[in-house]
Amino acid sequence: MRHLMVLLLLVVAALLTPSAAAAAQDGEAVGGTLRGPDGEPVAGVTIRVERAGQEIATATSGPDGRWRAAVPAPGDYDVTLDTGTLPDALTLREPDAATLRAVTIRPGQQRTVLFPIVSAADPAPGGAPGLPPAPSGPGSAAVLAQLTLAGIKFGAIIAITAIGLSLIFGTTHLINFAHGELVTIGAMAAFFLNAATIGPGWDLIPSALVAIAIGALVGAVLERALWRPLRIRGTGRIQLFIISIGLSLLLRHLLLVIFGSRPRPYTDYVIQRAVVIGPIAITPRDLVITVLSIVVLVAVGLMLLRTRIGKAMRAVSDDRELAEASGVDAARVDLYVWALGGGLAALGGVLFGLSEVVSWDMGFRLLLLMFAAVILGGLGSAFGAMVGGLVVGLIAQLSTAWFPVELQNAWALGLLILVLLVRPQGVFGRAERIG
Amino acid sequence: MDVIAILADATRSALGPVAALYALAAIGLNIHFGYTGLLNFGQVAFMLVGAYGVAVPVAVYGGPLWLGVLVGLALAVVLALLLGVPTLRLRADYLAIATIAAGEVLRIVFNAGFAQPVTGGVFGLSQFAGPFYAANPVPPGAYGLGPLVFGNRDVWVMIVGWGAVALATVGVFLLVRSPWGRVLRGVREDEDAVRSIGKNVFGYKMQSLVLGGVLGGAGGILLAVDAQAVTPNTFNPVVTFYLYTLVILGGAGTVLGPVLGSVVFWFLLSFADSALRQAIGAGYIPPQVIDPADVGALRFALVGLGLMLLLVFRPAGILGNRAEMRLGAGGSGVRRRRLPRATRKPVEGASR
């Protein structure tokens, strides 16, 4: 009993050190599957991950040939296959490719790397018919084109999630810090329907549709059960802001308990061969994500411009009192804005989860970028949020052509601060007194 | 279930070094948020520069520890000036987003590979506070009552930590009763009114930001010394949320609020943690319902729930006075001016 208590105290003490706070075992990793020339898995091979000559992690391939090494942060790593641990009958196709230098791991990414293995008896002829040399060098046109495409995809996802954030601020003056959790809820709902062992195992597309409905419902319930009663009580604006931070902490960690800390992918459309179009290569999955996001953005824009409820949303966002005086039911508009925001956030979550991986804090990682997008475009403006999202995505991705990848979000946040200083009403916002 | 052990755990963390350093950083945040109405959501950035200010000169450049402490405090002042000059003119909620973003940028940069020679990158720096522990006047041994014991190392950190908290509390007490403190509260209540009587509002806000930032830096220094290690990911935005929770719990805009808030917060947090673990261990809660590994996450969820309930039902906290500190009234752009209750008597003949 005494030992047990000591152990318990040690555990408690370990948990109490602030360094044990979130951001622990989730996140970035590198991995892959080792297969021999006939496609049979190769087990027991050691792979080392190093950074600046310092060993970060090692992994050994399992009986199915799979291996995975978690890395502590995004960045560039050297991944080395220890050729001494390969079975004697096998060898690497390119012997000097035992170390893959500067493998770039982006925030939240589960990077897959390949080590082509051939039989030692018939090594590949010199100058193996491998892939053409990858375009490299900062600023090369091909790299920029590729990054621009990635930026549009990332930016469109940010834009989709940020519209709701901006409209919610416009109509109810709430800075919704829990908006990231709506993104995570959407991604996880689709994960449950699509890939969870206890789920029904639907295809991703119907799962995504249901997830959007769930997101819209969660948004509407939050508005009616929490925010509207609080507004009626006359709760102050700063108070509401901090309450949304509490809600964010609560939801995020409940999701962590439900989902677990390990990031997991959807089952569909995960591994695809890239299609090469001119200088750029894109997987059909990323192409669909990009096109679909842009279609959704256009559709939302048309909805806001042409439909009655869309016009009402813009009217309430513009001037609540005036809209109410003109006969708009502002409370109903608030509800629709929350449902729209929740649904779009859920869709953004599914797309983000598809392009990377589903994890418990994915929405929170996206949140500050969403804020950057919203502030860039002007708080309260849906169209501003769309353009702001695209700009933030492009900046984050294009910066990696010249600067280290782990700084990509820092540039976007730096832009956020810069815009706040120079033009706090946003690039498209209406000038009003901010100070 | 061993209730004594749970209470001992809870009391240990309520009095321990971590509670002291959170109290210190929270006193700083209370100057910003409680007295001046500045919605600084980057307090963790001040802790970060304080912690690295002490770690880098000692661990990388081999300097003496006292120099590290001075560098840490100086960096907090520099950060306050850099952050304040451009952002203090922003409205409260914009300031919140700008400061949280600044904190994240710092964390990302300190994490980055190119900063590794100085900051140690993701692995951070460790073992730099040797002289502090070598100077420990407390003889080795365990101190405490029954199951509540602290090692001599912890006792030394606690003496210094709570000593700093006491100094800071007395300082804040004297400052807020001075004419300077009255102007600060005036800024919180109505910036324009203060400006209209010829006070330099920006200057007062800046002084408040520097003072509170230095206390945040001191909290960071204490964290670095206590853990003998710093990594950038320790300083994520959740730490600032914790600080807000405990400032509001104790009572924003009160002298003892942050200290009481920190003690109560850590007591409740580790009480919940320890009780949940014991309940699972003893089989009261089947592991299928709550896995022991989830207890850590549930604690964070409870903090979030607690923060929400506090703000909904008792935004003035334990010590606060509703009339003194009206959250959301000051500096938020949309001001609702409530008359004091006494003057709100219905006018004769004007009843509904």
Image (cartoon, coloured by chain):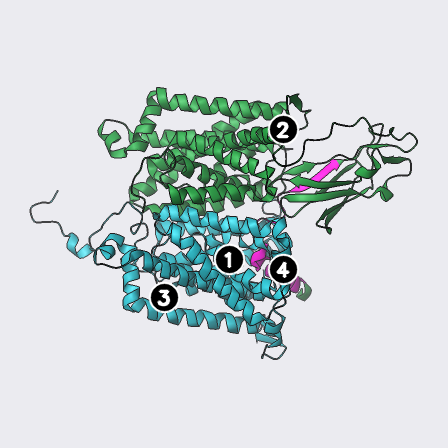
- The answer to the question of whether label 2 and label 4 lie on touching residues, with beta carbons closer than 8 A, is no
Residue A310 appears in the rendering? yes
- Above or below residue B51? Residue A434 is above
* N-term-proximal mark, 1 vs 4: 4
Closer to us: mark 2 or mark 1? 2
Mark 4 lies on a secondary structure that is strand
- Mark-to-mark CA distance, 3 and 2: 60 Å
Q: Helix, strand, or loop for circle 2? A: helix
Residue where numbered disc 4 is placed = B125
Look at label 1 and name its amino acid: Leu
Q: Quadrant of residue A257?
A: top right
Q: Which mark is residue A142?
A: 2
In the image, the chain rendered in cyan is: B
The residue wearing badge 3 is: B255
The three-letter code of the residue at mark 3 reads: Val
Q: Looking at numbered disc 2 in the image, what kind of residue is underneath it?
A: Ala
Rendered shade, chain A: green
For discs 3 and 1, the disc positioned in front in the rendered view: 3
Q: Which residues are magenta?
A: A4-32
Helix or strand or loop: what does disc 3 sit on? loop
Q: Residue furthest top?
A: A306
